[in-house]
Image: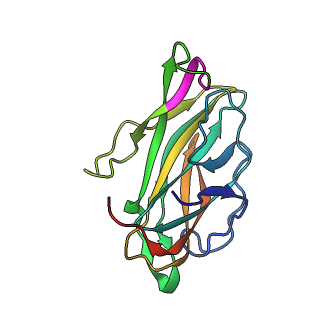
């Protein structure tokens, strides 16, 4: 994998709105793909996705919504194209969005595990292979809990190296909020597997 992570930049260098985005509400956060966000874990602190990947690599990150005191509903999520060097684009069809469902673990399977609800199944919002909408959203976020969306950026093998900018727009309780997404494509290509 690349060095995907989440930073504080809210610059959309042209992919979505063409300027600087306001920060998202304090109850939306981002984190890297290695984190397991359980329902009662604290909200991560990142606000914008800043990824690095090679050509022909898939790089994930997560957007997390806090339910607050009354609960919320994630009603929609959509990615813009990522605009890069020389106006090259990585189209929105190369950005796969999933709702992270929960799996109830009745007892830990080893010393690192724990009983309770764990994020594991990924339900595509739109299936990336047959392009059909699934029943992933709306997704309820109960009060005092967190829920996450898993997002994968599929970097084409022919993508020029450089910086790409766009957005992922979350619609929560009927209000659309664009989240800045930046991708640095490294100047090498991973072989197909």
Which residue is outermost to the bottom? 86
Residue depicted at x 44% and y 75%: 89
Is 17 in front, or is 180? Answer: 180
Residue nearer the viewer, 193 or 42: 193
Q: Is residue 108 magenta?
A: no
- Residue at 59% x, 24% y: name it: 113
Q: Where residue 93 sits: x, y (%)? A: 37, 61
Q: Quadrant of the C terminus?
A: bottom left
Tell me what residue is drawn at x 46 percent, y 54 percent: 152
Give the quarter of the image for residue 107.
Answer: top right
Q: Position of residue 9 (x, y in %)?
A: 71, 64
Residue 6 sits in quarter: bottom right
137 is higher (above) or lower (below) than 23: above
Query: Nearest the camera: 94 or 35?
Result: 35
Compared with 170, 147 (above or below) is above
- Give 58 or 113, whichever is nearer the viewer: 113
Q: Is residue 74 above or below residue 33?
A: above
Left or right of 94? Residue 54 is right
Q: Which residues are magenta?
A: 112-119
The structure residue drawn at horizontal position 50% and vertical position 19%, both measured from the top left corner, is: 104
Task: Count the labels in the image.
Answer: 0
Residue situated furthest top in the rendering: 106
Residue, far front: 111
Q: Is residue 142 left or right of residue 87?
A: right
**Left or right: where 172 falls relative to 59:** right
């Amino acid at each position: 994998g690349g060095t995907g992570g989440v930073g504080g930049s809210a610059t959309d260098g042209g992919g979505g709105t063409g300027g600087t985005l306001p920060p998202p509400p304090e109850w939306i956060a981002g984190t890297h793909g290695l984190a397991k966000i359980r329902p009662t874990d604290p909200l991560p602190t990142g606000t914008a996705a800043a990824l690095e990947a090679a050509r022909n690599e898939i790089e994930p990150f997560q957007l997390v919504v806090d339910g607050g005191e009354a609960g919320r509903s994630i009603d929609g999520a959509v990615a813009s194209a990522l605009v890069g060097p020389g106006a090259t684009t990585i189209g929105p069809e190369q950005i796969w969005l999933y709702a992270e469902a929960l799996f109830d673990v009745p007892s830990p399977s080893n010393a690192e595990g724990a009983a309770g609800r764990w994020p594991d199944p990924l339900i595509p919002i739109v299936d990336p292979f047959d392009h059909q909408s699934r029943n992933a959203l709306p997704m309820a976020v109960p009060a005092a809990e967190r829920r996450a969306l898993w997002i994968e950026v599929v970097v084409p093998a022919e993508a020029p190296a450089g910086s790409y900018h766009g957005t992922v727009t979350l619609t929560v309780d009927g209000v659309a909020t664009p989240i800045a997404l930046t991708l640095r494509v490294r100047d090498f290509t991973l072989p197909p597997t």
